[in-house]
Image: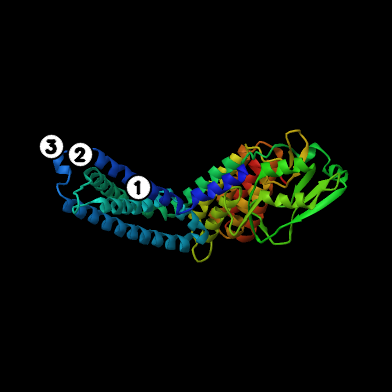
Amino acid sequence: MKSKIKYFWFLLKGSFWFLPIVIIGLSQGAAVLMIYLDTTFNYQPEGFIRYFFLDSVDSARSVLSIIAAAMIGVAGTVFSITLVALTLASSQFGSRLLRNFMYDRLNQVVLGTYVSTFAYCIIILKTVRSESFTFTPNFSVLLAIFLALGNIILLIIFIHHISISIQADRVISDVGSELSRGIRRLFPVKMGEGKDENDLDRNALLTNLEYQYSLNCKKDGYLQSIDNESLIRSAKKNEVVVELNHRPGHYLVEGIQLLKVYSSKPVENEAIENLHDAFVYGDIRTPHQDAEFAIHQLVEIAARALSPGVNDPYTAIACIDKLTSSMGYLTKVSFPKSIRLDDDQEIRVLTSPSSFESMMDASFNQIRYFAVGSPAVLSKLMQSFVTINKLAETEEQKIAITRHVGRLLKAAENSVDDGYYIQEIKSLRKEYFEEE
């Protein structure tokens, strides 16, 4: 349950509407507080300070009406600017990158601030009275004026932010930062204690568990999250071993096998069906537990840049730089183990987790394919492999990198006519890598 709550909180924070609604709620609370302040303290300004306070009910109404109308008008302008930026980003980088613009914190703050200022003025305007008794909320109106002045500055900041947010280098930087945060959050994954498959005979373990059950998906969709703690707890309670066939990011079709359950004794069907509660499905992929999500975003930008209609190798090179940085970090992390243990050190879950090799494949296979015929990008890929190889700490990592070097050399020999680049790749391979 704790893992599911974290997942839904992650989605809530990333939604476009949540933060603006929170800001609007705070503005309404501020309006009530300021009205209470005005009714409690009968302040009579004197000297220079009196020029900042209003002297009549009509003045208060006019100021509040002007600010409210201006703020809701600017909010419409902000919507328009945002939509234009989204349209440009969609055509240049792909519609999947729109998520990054929609979830931008500054865009949400700007939208929430203008609408909340409008709501604040409406509430204060309702309290201005001149019939049965005269009430001029001086402190409340003064705060509205300060909010209006602050919103003018915020508008300038917003326009500057939008103008640079659709630049290719900025988009790549933002996606690269998201990738960096994501892999630091997901690796190493905490899913109970774990072991490598080499630590025990997996086949012998499953052979001793004579009862086997299959749990199928109930609906189509992407596997967005797995409540790891709940899954281990359920497996321990029912004294079973669970074998996962999929990981977050995989698309599942209704009826396909989600997992297998092994037990040394019969298990009730209800207990097997309850394992569904540990999985969250959705119509789209999310970066919550999907380690390859941001990688695919960078790869998509690079692939679009290398298409014949665009032919922008420098954008692809910038994507490769970000992927190289992330893969360099992954050489030092502990990838999740394939065998999970409960608190009593009993085996409960068998998985096929992400590995360094799978992350390398996700990062560079498609880029290498689309870079065929582009010497500058192929050369940059080779330099990136050299950098990652220098950081590699295990033999498995070096083997995975060497395989990509071999594929890169074949792609260069088959598509590049300029012998200079091929010779450069061969020289780097000879200097830093062993022959496969």
Crowding at dot 3, Cα within 10 Å, few <14 / some 14-19 / many 20+, comes out as few
The picture places residue 336, in percent across and down from the top left corner, at: 68, 41
Question: Of discs 2 and 3, which sits in the foreground?
Answer: 2
The picture places residue 101, in percent across and down from the top left corner, at: 45, 54
The picture places residue 213, in percent across and down from the top left corner, at: 81, 52
Asked whether, in this view, residue 91 is left or right of residue 235, the answer is left
Residue 50 in sight: yes
Which comes before the other along the chain, label 1 or label 2?
1
Q: Nearer the viewer, residue 342 or 428?
A: 342
Query: Mark 3 sits on what residue?
Result: 46
Q: Nearer the viewer, residue 251 or 280?
A: 280
Q: Quadrant of the N terminus?
A: top right
The CA distance from mark 3 to mark 1 is: 29 Å
Q: Residue at x 29, y 42 (%)?
A: 36
Dots 3, 1 in contact, CB < 8 A: no
Asked whether, in this view, residue 122 is left or right of residue 356, the answer is left
Q: Residue furthest front?
A: 132
Query: Mark 1 sits on what residue?
Result: 27
Q: Residue furthest bottom?
A: 309
Amino acid marked by disc 3 = Glu
The CA distance from mark 2 to mark 3 is: 13 Å
Question: Of discs 1 and 2, which sits in the foreground?
Answer: 2
The CA distance from mark 1 to mark 2 is: 23 Å
Crowding at dot 1, Cα within 10 Å, few <14 / some 14-19 / many 20+, comes out as many
Give the secondary structure at mark 1: helix
Q: Residue furthest top?
A: 344
Give the secondary structure at mark 3: loop
Query: Mark 2 sits on what residue?
Result: 42
